[in-house]
Amino acid sequence: MTSQVLADYLGGRRALGREIRSDFDLDDAIREGLPLSAIESVVRGGALSPSELDALVIPRRTLAHRKRLGRRLSARQSDRLTRVVRVVARAEEAIGEFAKAQRWLRKPNRALRGKRPLDLAASDVGIRVVEQLLGRIEHGLGA
């Protein structure tokens, strides 16, 4: 998974207002706070629904407040958004098709103790568990 792929999910240069060519570029963008247009791109592209965004990245009221003030996401919110988008992109990469990956992310999985993969995206440890499972899927070890 490259930083450029993540940047595309986040809306690319148009939404981010900058070119992302490396992990360092993405790290700089996260630390400065991603523009709200990145959230709009993620929702518009179907990677996350507004309710998933609310649960995993930024509460609706906080998002509305940031919009009113014309502020960017905080570094922490930007990191959470990027982390969740990374899992979505990784699922598409492992499963091979966006629609199938979206269904897989939202369906309870026995290998995850009955939890939905996207629900585990709320923490770094949960993300690692999901990424390990996606690696197993890629290598034909099943889920």
Image (tube, rainbow, N blue to C red):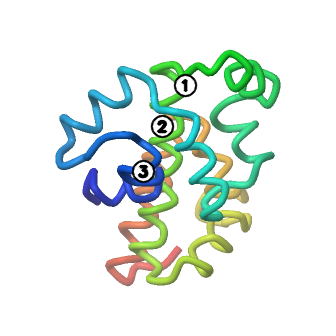
Report helix, strand or loop for mark 3: helix
Q: CA distance from mark 2 to mark 3?
A: 31 Å
Q: CA distance from mark 2 to mark 1?
A: 23 Å
Of callouts 2 and 1, which one flags the residue occurring earlier in the amino acid sequence? 1
Where disc 2 sits, the SS reads helix
Q: Residue at x 36, y 50 (%)?
A: 13
Dot label at residue 14: 3
69 or 32: nearer the eye? Answer: 69
Inspect the image, locate mark 2, and give the three-letter code of the amino acid beneath it.
Val
Marks 3 and 1 sit apart, C-alpha to C-alpha, by: 16 Å
- Which residue has dot 2 on it? 125
Give percent across and percent down for residue 56.
Answer: 66, 38
Identify the mark nearer the N-term, 3 or 1. Answer: 3
Report the side of 72 relative to 116 (left or right): left
Query: In the picture shown, does residue 120 fall above or below 90?
Result: above
Q: Residues within 10 Å of mark 3 (few under 14, many from 20)?
A: few
**From the image, which quarter does the N terminus lie in?**
bottom left
Label 3 is placed on what type of residue? Answer: Arg
Is 20 left, or right, of 60 in this rendering?
A: left
89 is higher (above) or lower (below) than 7 = below
Label 1 secondary element: loop
**Foreground mark, 3 or 1?**
3
Q: Which picture quadrant has residue 64?
A: top right
Instruction: Give the x, y percent position of residue 138.
Output: 36, 77
The answer to the question of whether label 2 and label 3 lie on touching residues, with beta carbons closer than 8 A, is no
Q: Residues within 10 Å of mark 2 (few under 14, many from 20)?
A: few
State the image quarter where residue 112 is shown.
bottom right
- The answer to whether mark 3 and mark 1 are in CB contact below 8 A is no
- Amino acid carrying label 1: it is Leu
